[in-house]
Amino acid sequence: MTLSRKPLKGMRELTPGEKRIEDYIIKRLRVAGAAYGFEEYETPVLEPLDLFLAKSGNELAVKQSYNFTDKGGRKLIMRPELTPSLARMVAASGELIYPVKWMSFPVCYRYEKPQRGRAREFMQFNLDILGVDGLEAELEVFLVLKRIMNSLNASPGQYVIRYSSRRLASEILESCGMTEEEIAQAFAVIDKKDKIKPDEWEELVRKTIKDERNADTIISFTSCSDPDAPWLAEAAGGSKAYVEIVRFRGMLKDAGILEAQFEACVVRGLDYYTGIVFEVMDSGGINRRAICGGGRYDNLVGMFGGQKVTGVGFGLGLLTLELFLETYGLIPDGISGKHPADIFLAVYSDEERTFAVNLAEKLRDFGVSVEIDITGKNLSKQFKIADRKSIGYIAVIGPEEVASGRITIKNMSSGTKTECEISGIPQILADKNLCGEAN
Ligand code: HAM
């Protein structure tokens, strides 16, 4: 039987070139979070199923998850998201200094149909603030998002941060007399609004929400793109959630976050959200999946008993972000092909090997990344290897170099050669801005 050469459908398998692109993105996400004082944390991939049943809801924890019973009879889940684990960790840590500002890069698992922007195994960047009840937390999270997009050279016209309020939507639906269960149903339908054609969606609303007036309310509410829209101002004007959203709009404007846009139809799919919810979308509409989704969740931590701690944050998909960057040509040329080694040391014969290995070690001590020949092939084959790996510089260590202590470094792209004392190599690579260059 021949084994398949393909990984399981939808699983994450990255070549070094693809990983370099992902690392380019991860680095910018980490730097953006650190700029606001966020610290990194980790949680387990494998979790009790109950945790996610209670926190993420049936749809994600059962229908869209990898769950199974282990050899000890425990019902487990491969985490489909991170927030319930974060809430548990915060509830269990007695001595946290609030506000807690944490970030993480979990690999998550969802049993979904793999398609563009949707995988079964995917990495998220999560960033959350816990212990702040006011909108200052939301504002800071939006600022981080803007900084992330800036640092990836995305311009404001290419993306939009769409936001709304689950509390506002609940208030409006409650005022029509809808029950909690009907409101949950309504949220699930509203969440599909941008995923299907407008007429199909309206049909779905009318099919799911039997009361015609309630269906009309949902359709009118979700078409509002401005808190001042007359329908909305009349339906909700003066309510707590309405006042909050108007205030938040002002805060965003004052902070210069002009890429934020109110869209009443944003509710996000997770039932634990209680307040402002948001998503980052490609404004060109080429990538239809949200690059990031998040919101305020005021009751998650408290559900573990003990102190009530409010939270706000987001999960950003590395895959969706990368597709967005690719669409707009924002992944710098050459990243995937850039080999980590600064220089390749070709070894003329076994006579020079010890000298060459010791030299390579010294250079590494200076922070130079060195790949040295370990194949024992002839020089022309070694050159070919260095060339195919696109290593920027090459130097040969032969009898003359050993005797004189001087070598010639060749720049592989320009062909120019520089002769120098061996001790001068780190300086030469540094001058060329290559030694230890960050992506
Ligand atoms: P979510 O909206 O389920 O939220 O996912 C957040 C982001 O993860 C999505 O916008 C998307 O970029 C990415 N994502 C989700 N599923 C997939 C998939 N199958 N393949 C690739 N990317 C995917 C949450 O997960 C919340 N826990 C986020 C959060 C953190 N809210 C507050 N704090």
Image (cartoon, rainbow, N blue to C red):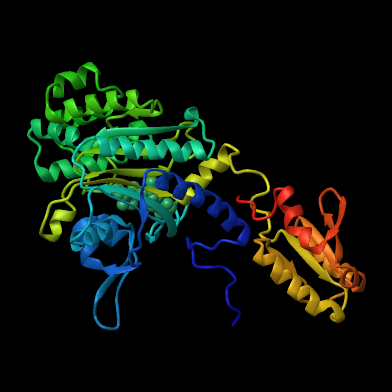
**Residue 61's spot in the image, x, y percent?**
27, 60
Residue at image location 57% in from the left, 43% down from the top: 326
Residue at image location 48% in from the left, 45% down from the top: 321
**Residue 183's spot in the image, x, y percent?**
15, 41
In this rendering, does residue 208 appear at all?
Answer: no
Residue at image location 41% in from the left, 28% down from the top: 259
Please count the marks in the image.
0
Q: Quadrant of the N terminus?
A: bottom right
Point out the residue furthest to the top here: 230
* Quarter of the view holding residue 84: bottom left
**Residue 307's spot in the image, x, y percent?**
11, 55
Residue at image location 17% in from the left, 25% down from the top: 243
- Left or right of 418: which side holds 134? left
**Residue 114's spot in the image, x, y percent?**
46, 55
In this rendering, does residue 296 appear at all?
Answer: yes
In this view, the residue in front, 404 or 116, is: 404
In this view, the residue in front, 353 or 144, is: 353
